[in-house]
């Protein structure tokens, strides 16, 4: 499930930037109080970009919208800091291309929203 969600969220970003990123593995959090939490590892093919570890508490693995929101938020940060995406608004807002969309929960769904108008523009992972 998490591999499919990572792939779906990556499709929300321009292909030339997201193409080198992929789901790598899920690693259980071994801390004594982790209570079912996991680390989702996403890897880059670029020698300039490192791997990303995204922590998921057990209660955010479901519902799907919470998992999508967490993935979208972290992948947006990482792709924006990557060698290919540096300095670009990712994913770009279709209303104002100078800034990125922001992932938010709206009506129980994960959606990309314009940070200026707060208008929902498209679902996260709809790519």
Image (cartoon, grey):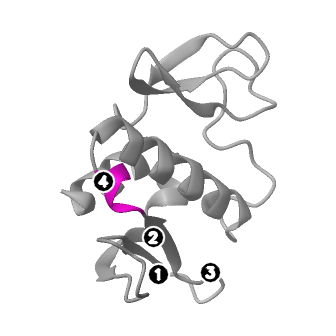
Circles 2 and 1 in contact, beta carbons < 8 Å: yes
Q: Is the C-beta separation of discs 1 and 4 under 8 Å? A: no
Tell me: residue 8, above or below residue 113.
below
* Among numbered discs 1 and 4, the one appearing first in the sequence: 1
Q: Nearer the viewer, mark 4 or mark 3?
A: 4
Gap between marks 4 and 2, in whole Å?
25 Å
Identify which residue, 27 or 73, lies in the foreground: 27
- Picture quarter with the C terminus: top left
90 inside magenta stretch = no
> On the picture, is 74 further left or further right than 122?
right
User: Quick check: 3 left or right of 107?
Assistant: left
Spot the residue most to the left: 1
Q: Are marks 2 and 3 in contact (CB under 8 Å)?
A: yes
* Cα distance in 3D space between marks 2 and 3: 10 Å
Looking at the rendering, the stretch of residues picked out in magenta corresponds to 57-61
Q: What whole-number distance in Å separates the C-alpha atoms at marks 1 and 4?
A: 26 Å
User: Marks 4/3: CA distance?
Assistant: 26 Å
The tag earlier along the polypeptide, 2 or 1, is 2
Q: Residue at x 34, y 52 (%)?
A: 59
Q: CA distance from mark 2 to mark 1?
A: 5 Å
Give whichever of 19, 26 is nearer the camera: 26
Residue under label 3? 49
Residue 86 point in image, percent of width and height: 76, 61
- Disc 1: which residue: 45
Left or right of 58? Residue 87 is right
Rendered location of residue 72, percent (x, y): 50, 47
Q: CA distance from mark 1 to mark 3?
A: 8 Å
Circle 4 residue: 61
- Residue ID for mark 2: 20
Q: Main secondary structure of the magenta part?
A: helix
Q: SS of the residue at dot 3?
A: loop
């Amino acid at each position: 499930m998490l591999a499919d969600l990572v792939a779906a969220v990556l499709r929300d970003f321009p292909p030339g930037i997201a193409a080198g990123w992929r789901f790598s593995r899920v690693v259980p959090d071994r801390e004594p109080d982790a209570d079912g939490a996991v680390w989702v590892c996403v890897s880059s093919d670029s020698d300039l970009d490192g791997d990303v570890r995204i922590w998921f508490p057990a209660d955010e693995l479901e519902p799907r919208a919470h998992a999508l929101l967490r993935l979208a938020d972290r992948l947006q940060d990482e792709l924006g800091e990557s060698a290919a995406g540096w300095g670009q608004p990712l994913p770009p807002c279709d209303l104002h291309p100078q800034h990125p969309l922001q992932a938010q929960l709206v009506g129980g769904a994960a959606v990309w929203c314009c940070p200026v108008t707060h208008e929902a523009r498209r679902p996260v992972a709809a790519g």
